[in-house]
Image (tube, rainbow, N blue to C red):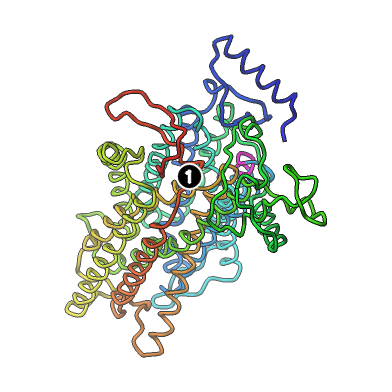
Amino acid sequence: MAKPSTQRDSQQQQQQAMENGEGAYAQDGSVDLRGNPLLRSKRGGWTACAFIVVYELFERMAYYGIASNLVMYMTNRLHQGTVEASNNVTNWSGTVFLTPLIGAVVADAYLGRYWTFVAGSAIYLMGMILLTLSVTVPALKPPACDGATCPRASALQLGVYFGGLYTIALGHGGTKPNISTIGADQFDDFDPAEKLHKLSFFNWWMFTIFLGILFSSTVLVYLQDNVSWTVGYGIPTLGLLVSVAIFLAGTPLYRHKAPQGSPFTSMGRVVAAAVWKRGMALPDDAKELHELELEHYTSRRRFRMDATDSMRFLNKAAVKVNPGDANGGSAPARLPPWTLCTVTHVEETKQIAKLVPLLFTLVVPCTLVAQANTLFVKQGATLDRRLGAFLVPPASLGAFITLTMLICVALYDRVFVPAVRRRTKNPRGITLLQRIGAGMLLQVVTMVVTAGIENRRLSFARGHGPDAAGVLPLTIFVLLPQFVLLGAADALLVVGQVEFFYDQAPESMKSLGTALSLVAYGAGNVLSSAILSLVGRVTAKRGSPWVTNNLNASRLDYYYALLTVLAAVNLSVFLALSGRYKYRSESRETIDVDVQGGPVRLHSEPAPVA
């Protein structure tokens, strides 16, 4: 709780700044690194975001410089089989996207977003350096194949390489949940113009990410396949170093949010209090539940939340039973102080709990996304990659996913949203869950097309024998439709998913909300490994394995058909859950956008905009 003298000092500083013509202080509780209030005109906005966005451009180039071609390194240099390599890639990717939960808790409860990010960046950079050494130092590289004989990598070689990968995963846990949140924090929700800018932030944030991925899946992948892995890994490492330097250079311009305690501690307290008071009756009037005065929240630029009827059992955490509580109480014996929670704490817990079912429905879509860096790449390796005198790296087809996403995100933000907003009166055009659902539907279409293309490839393999290297005389560009469609689906799903979890997380748990969106990717990659391993074992027992090291003798089309069915069933569950979802009340203060170019106004009446 802020001291009264501190609040008075803040108000005096703001008044003095206004008198000096310096503009207003940030109204959302933003501070500088020392915890002092800051002028909105001096920090934040798109100026500060420029450093953050450029960081993300270089960092994504570094990350996808490793991830895009990882399956090819594991099969061609570590001499692993298709299933083993695919599972190692998805297991690592799963870890990469699960560690942000740790980073989110550290940021929200202890270090704050900025310092958690800086610590994570240092670990991330150490992992990149270790990985680059593992493909550069001769003793750390497995020997090349001698004809058909490919010696396995030693324990030391595997230990150093995977040690680098999982060090990156640990560092990623500190950077990923915080960098986009730091970017969004540069816009003041209490200022109508800045709040409107935030609506476009995530679209352009993803646009920048796609640019980094595009460079990785074309230039870096080509260098790895045709020059050397040392160069292909060294450039991303230098890129990460540059990106961290750029981020640190923008420090004087950033707005910061002070840590507000562990979200898991707060939520655990609410659940424990509700269980402790399970025998207590809820009052007929929700206003009799424990809550602080509105001024307590407004003085801290926070939202107060009203009690809702959803998950009513948790409301018992706010039941006042002690004689000394406000408005009295009738309990015969005093209860521990921790058993009394505010309505706002209860509603914040409910809000996170409401996100969990939707989070589960996003695991399968993330499993489908995982195929692009594993089996899609291995498909490309079986086809004719010649383009004139140029040999297309199999992983470079991922560039078409990125190009499609770039085009679709720009069209969505600049054409679709303004056109639809005139009819829906929603600043986003359509709701976030509608956007995610559209992406899921397009993913189902993508998998249908992918299964059909693979069926055609296998038919061609049966009629035209592959060469000694297992390559068919069929152009790699027959795979183009599945990459383009997946890119269009990701433009809807990926951006909508990140924005949804950030927007719907309570104000004090934004890092956790961002981390939850990444957890879906982590769980999706883990599920991909589990499904692929299970399908491999079951079909091998039946004498006709669907996925083997020789994809020309496999039935990958059946595997894609299985994923299609899984995606369709998952979409049905998502539609059922999203239709019943109610957006959080504090985020429903909406912006009234005059689509004819008039003024922008902030309404205080609740209105569903997400």
Residue sitting nearer the eye, 245 or 588: 588
Q: Could you tell me what secondary structure mostly forms the magenta stretch?
A: helix
Q: Position of residue 141 (x, y in %)?
A: 52, 63
| Visible residue check, residue 126 | no
Q: Is residue 114 magenta?
A: yes
| Visible residue check, residue 12 | yes
Q: Residue at x 62, y 34 (%)?
A: 294
Q: Where is residue 119 in the image (x, y as percent from the top left)?
A: 64, 44
Location of residue 164 with respect to 298 vertically, above or below = below
Residue sitting nearer the eye, 466 or 548: 548
Q: In which quarter of the image is the N terminus?
A: top right
Q: Is residue 105 magenta?
A: no
* Disc 1 residue crowd, few under 14, some 14–19, many 20+, Cα 10 Å: many
Residue sitting nearer the eye, 8 or 347: 347
Residue on which disc 1 sits: 503
Span shown in magenta: 113-118
